[in-house]
Image (spheres, rainbow, N blue to C red):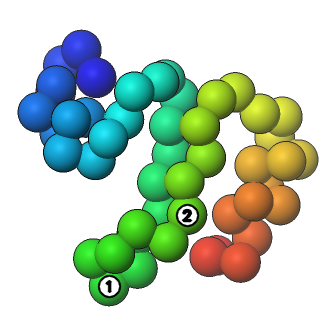
Amino acid sequence: MDDNPDVARRFGVMSIPTMIVFKDGQEVSRVVGAKAKGQLMADFQPFL
């Protein structure tokens, strides 16, 4: 956000960390906030 405020604004990133998954140029998932590794793996497993 600090280094690229235009990109953060374009994607509506208001908090760090924010992870966004895109498919064919469209956002399909967004995870905001710190999470444990296991939870992140579960959240992103459908996209791997």
37 and 25: which is toward the camera = 25
Tell me, for residue 39, which label it has, or none: none
Residue 6 in the image: x percent, y percent? 11, 33
Amino acid type assigned to the residue bearing label 1 in the image: Asp
Which quadrant: the N terminus?
Answer: top left
Mark 2 vs mark 1, CA separation in Å: 13 Å
Q: Is residue 28 above or below residue 24?
A: above
45 and 6: which is toward the camera = 6
Amino acid type assigned to the residue bearing label 2 in the image: Ser
The crowding category of the residue bearing disc 1, from other C-alpha atoms within 10 Å (few below 14, some 14 to 19, many at least 20), is few
Find residue 2 and report its image quarter: top left
48 horizontally vs 24: left or right: right
The answer to whether mark 2 and mark 1 are in CB contact below 8 A is no
Task: Tell which residue pokes out farthest to the top in this image.
Answer: 2
Q: Is residue 47 above or below residue 27?
A: below
Label 1: state its secondary structure: loop
Q: Residue at x 32, y 41 (%)?
A: 12
Q: Residue at x 32, y 85 (%)?
A: 24
Residue 35 in the image: x percent, y percent? 77, 33
Identify the residue position indicated by label 2 in the image: 29
Identify the residue position indicated by label 1 in the image: 24
Task: Tell which residue pokes out farthest to the bottom in this image.
Answer: 24
Q: Is residue 22 above or below residue 24?
A: above
Task: Tell which residue pokes out farthest to the right in this image.
Answer: 38
Residue 48 in the image: x percent, y percent? 64, 76
Q: Residue at x 59, y 37 (%)?
A: 32
